[in-house]
Every structure is written in C-alpha cells, then in structure tokens.
Image: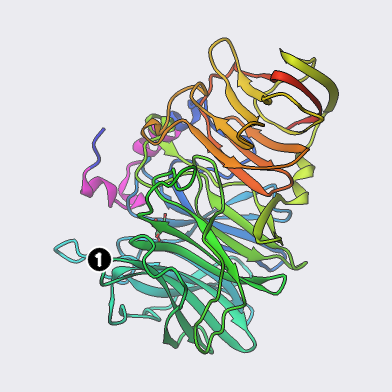
Amino acid sequence: MIWTKEQRYRRIEEASKEEILNLQAAVEGCQWRQTFHIQPETGLLNDPNGFSYYNGEYHLFYQWFPLGPVHGLKYWYHTKSKDLVHWENAGIGIEPSSKFDRHGAYSGSAIEHEGKLHFLYTGNTRDENWVRHPYQCLAFMDVNGKINKLEQPVIDHVPYGYTDHFRDPKVWKAGNEYYAVIGAQRENETGCVVLYRSLDLQNWNFEGELRTSLSSFGYMWECPDYFELQDQGVLIFSPQGLTPNGDLFQNIYQSGYVLGEPLDVRTRTLTHGSFQELDRGFDFYAPQTMLAPDGRRILVGWMGLPEMEYPTDKNGWAHCLTLPRELSIRGSKLVQQPVKELQGLRKQQHNISDVLFDEKNVYEHFNGASFEMICEFENFDAEVFGVEFRAGAKEKTILKYDAVQKKVILDRTFSGEPVGEQYGTERKCSVDGTKIKLHLFVDISSVEIFINDGEEVFTSRIFPGADSKEIRFFAEGGRALFQASKWDI
Ligand code: FRU
C-alpha cells in the first residue's frame, strides 16, 4: 500500500471508528505481537521520549503514528510503570495540536521542575512548500497526569549556521541551571550537537556548538543525550550518513557514544575518545537515558530503524522499545546490563551443563518463544560454538563465537520472514576471553543479547514461525564446556 502525504498527516480523530476497529483487528491477528516489550496498540512506534521518574512512577513516552505502520503525524504516547518491567498504557501524552507542532510532536525529554514534569520537545512544522520549521516547545504534566502546553515555543528559531534539521532536545540540571543539547546539522551538511542554557526552562540562551573532535562525522546527529557517569562525560547520539567500515556501521543509521572528561559548559568542550557503537545488532536507534531515584543511569532504545520495512507492516503496526538497561563504565567502554527488576519476569527455571564435542544437542525443557537464558562457555578448543534458538525445521537464529576470528556473530539469515536483507544478514564484533557469557532475552519477535555482562549488546527483531521454538547448543571443530540457565517468561 502506498501512503500519500494526506494519509500520513491525518489526525487520529479523522479516522472513522470502523477504520480503527479494522486496524485493531489486523494488529490482533499478527503472529509477532510481543509479550514483554512496549509496543504500539496500532500504527508505528519510534523513539523513546520523556523517560523519567515522577510522582512515584517511571514515565516513558514514545513517538507514535497511530493510523498505520508509517512515519506520519507523530504523537507522544504515554506509558508508565512502578518497576520498569510492567508498563501500563496511559494514552496520548502530547498531541500535535498547535501552530508550533502541527506536523508532529517530535522527540524530546522530561525533567521535574516546581512539582511538575516538564517536557522539552521539538514541534515539527512544514510550510506550504513543505519546508521544515522546527520549534522547541514546552509542556508540563501535573500529579494527576494532565498535560498542558506552553502556547509559545521556548526556542523559536534555528540559530545562524544550522539547517532546519534541528531537533530532539535532551535536558538536564546542573546546580541551579538547566542545560539542553539539541541534534543539529551545520549549513555544510555535517552533523553536530548544540548547547542551550536556562534558569527556568522557558528562557533559553543559545550557548553554541559542543566542541568535539568529530568535525565531519555524518550529515545529521539525531537524539543527543549528555550525562555524567563515574566521573566521566558521556555523549550519546545517533549519527546519520556514516559509511560501513569492517564490522562497524552496518545498519542504515547508527547509534553510539563518546566517553571522556565531563563537559566544560563554559567552553562547551568535550575531550573524548573515539565514537563507539552502543549496539551491534540489526535494530537499534535513538536511545534515551534517565536517572533513576537510586542513582542508576538507565537506557531505553527504539528497536527499529527509520526508512525500513518490517514484516508486521502488513498487520498495521511496527516496532517496539528495548528493555531498560543499566549503564556503567568499564575501562573505556559503556557497558549495558538488563535492569535487575527484569528478574521479576522469570517463571520456571531449568539448568544444564554439558561438554560438546563437534556436535549439536538439544536438551529437555530448553525451548520456547519467550524466555531469558544465561549461557556460559569455557574450556573451549572448538573453532566455533554457540546456540541456535527460535529454531524449527527450516528456521533458526544463530548466535556463535568464532574462536579463530575471536568474534561473536549473530546470524539471522534463517530467522524467518526476512527483514532489511539489503543491509546483510550477519552482525559481528570482536570479543576476547577464555569465558564467553551470553545473556539472551527472547520475545515473540525480538532478541536482546548481552555478551560478557554487557560488554557488547546485540539487539534485533526476528520474525520466525510460532512453532520454531527449539534451542540447540553446538560446537564445531573441537570441544566446548557450557552451562546454561533458562527461565520461561
Ligand atoms: C529519530 C527521529 C527524530 C525525530 C523523530 C520523529 O528517529 O527522526 O530525530 O524527532 O524521529 O519521529
């Protein structure tokens, strides 16, 4: 189906009851609905927005086009949770309703101020020639969950030297000042991040560009996020326009970070190491972090990518969010671990340990379509070893360690219904060690894999048939000892 501009920019109330019911029925009939991930009731989900803790609950919004699996008129949809695991749908958060956000309430962030949760987000507008005019807007939610907007934008123009690709403010507080980073494109069509400062979230001063050592690194940086962790400064962003390089930058767009000294807000200088990808899988973009009340820095990403078709499109919906991950710094790396609250999803536990010698084995109780599994391999001299999961007669998703190349490889060539094959069907990254620990969260149409306690993460959608449920352990060209625990979810 071809979506015209008119169809993509329809408001939700312009759809008839019948249209919505038909859409809901198509979604309900989809074999790939998730069981423990945030997913849209209908239509398309993209970036996580406004991730915060307020009034005793976590709040997590997402970019949402309700009427189909395409990028159209974006709303903020609101979900909330007491434990970061069980999320309740709370309805539309911000609608694109004013002169300054009429073509979409685009991405942004949240912070508590004077008892209300404030949202700083990009109002997307287009003029009669379909030229973008972005505004940075403010809205606030009270303890009853009611959201109001400030009538006028708080940043009403793009500063000199930048194009209309100017969006996704992420706000934080330092002392009694507020700061915000915004993703931008310079007039020479290179990406960067700019910094604003405010005392009250309403009057913002343009401070200038963040000085990084990445002066020509892609054409646009979306969804920046700055925070400090273990006395270091971390800048996360999603650059567009990087060229694939070996195992790196294989997806259509990237998401990653630089680590270094804390940002000097006066000189806007960030002294940092090289750009590193946050995720090595097929489907990960536009992550956002928040600071939990207990001091943990928690990240959620969009488990999808722009400009790609997915098999759920034909059922009227697309995408989900990743599980929340706690961040920490280990050496020169940002490490991601599933938040401990996720253990609350664990049902029946099964354990095995075995030595594999040039063989592939299945074990009683080791199967399923939605489960958590931790699997440690050691004492290996095999050339390759690993697991196949969501496997059946014809399908399997393969996660393996190539001990010769010293690489972890995720292979979705045979995962089921194809997706994004033009970008390849394998993802790899270097991992070294005498022990390889694989921690998987498998849902009906996704897998998130934490390698060696979060040193690397692979996040991917997969679209297998409902009866592809086998888990198989294998070693090739030698021996590997392993032990595994699996919990049904
Ligand atoms: C990233 C992004 C943001 C924008 C939003 C619109 O995926 O393009 O830059 O605010 O999505 O939905």
Is 3 left or right of 33, judged from the image as shown? left
The quadrant of the rendering that contains the C terminus is top right
Please state the quadrant of the image where ligand 1 appears: bottom left
Say which residue appears at 77% left-offset and 50% top-offset: 341
Q: Amino acid at mark 1?
A: Arg
Determine the secondary structure under disc 1.
loop
Q: Residue 66: x and y, percent?
A: 40, 46
Is 486 left or right of 423, judged from the image as shown? right
Is 213 left or right of 359, judged from the image as shown? left
Q: Quadrant of residue 99?
A: bottom left
Q: Residue 404: x and y, percent?
A: 64, 31
Residue 277 among those drawn in magenta: no
**Mostly what secondary structure, the magenta segment?**
helix
Residue 387 visible:
yes
Mark 1 CB in 8 Å range of ligand 1?
A: no
Say which residue appears at 53% left-offset and 74% top-offset: 171
The quadrant of the rendering that contains the N terminus is top left
Toward the viewer: 304 or 386? 386
What residue does disc 1 label?
132
Say which residue appears at 64% left-offset and 22% top-offset: 388
Question: What's drawn in magenta, residue-wise?
Answer: 4-24
Q: Residue 106: x and y, percent?
A: 40, 62
Label 1 neighbour load within 10 Å: few <14, some 14-19, many 20+: some
Outermost residue on the top side: it is: 393
Residue 361 visible:
no
